[in-house]
Image (tube, rainbow, N blue to C red):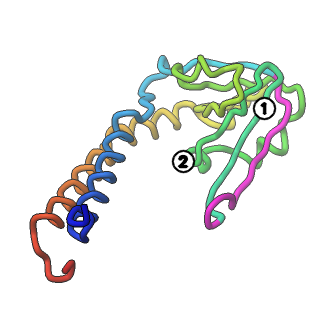
Amino acid sequence: MKRYFNDKHIRLYFCLIASLYFLYSGITREKILLHSDLITVKGNYITHSFKDETGYRRNGHEYYIWIKQSTNPFQIKANYLDIFNDAAFISTVRVDDKIEFTIPKRLENKLGSNENIFVTSIEVNGTNYLSQNETISREKRLNDSNAEYLLAGMFLIAGLLAYFVRLPWLS
């Protein structure tokens, strides 16, 4: 058993696990490419919670909005925050304003639960705070990049090199 946990094997195991993680992430990633991949959720605004500098090393962001018609917190993904007009949202949106979100179709069955649902657009009383066109454009670029598959391949190659090739700085 000890022979399977030496440095050479541990590097291989680490790289294989990382490779499988990135492969799984690429396969299961949300694919939003068209407006037809989204559905609209309407309701009356209750409150929001916009927190920056949360989590590990205080570099996280937690942006949630609640409406009367659903128990779900509606979350703005961190990679949409730079296109979300939060200052205008905070200063103009009031309790009971009509709010409209678009969400991915696959999350429709989670409506009414307490699970977070991420939004791809936010419109309140005709004012757009998070543009659906911009979020779809970002999702298309992310989908076209295939970064997860490239990382999976790189980790697989690195693991195999660490296992089969004896490199002086790894000894």
Who is closer to the viewer here, 98 or 15?
15
Question: Residue placed at 48% from the left, 33% from the top?
Answer: 136
**Kind of residue indicated by mark 2:** Asn
Q: Is residue 4 visible?
A: yes
- Residue 13, image x and y in percent? 27, 57
Q: Is residue 2 magenta?
A: no
Q: Which mark is residue 79?
A: 2
Q: Which residue is mark 1?
A: 66
Q: Is residue 52 magenta?
A: yes
Q: Which residues are magenta?
A: 44-57
Who is closer to the viewer here, 49 or 125?
49
Most distant residue in the right direction: 95
Which SS does the magenta portion mostly show? strand
Q: Which mark is residue 132?
A: none
Q: Look at the picture and state if 54 lies above or below 168.
A: above
Q: Residues within 10 Å of mark 1 (few under 14, many from 20)?
A: some
Alpha carbon distance from label 1 to label 2: 20 Å
- Residue 142, image x and y in percent? 39, 42
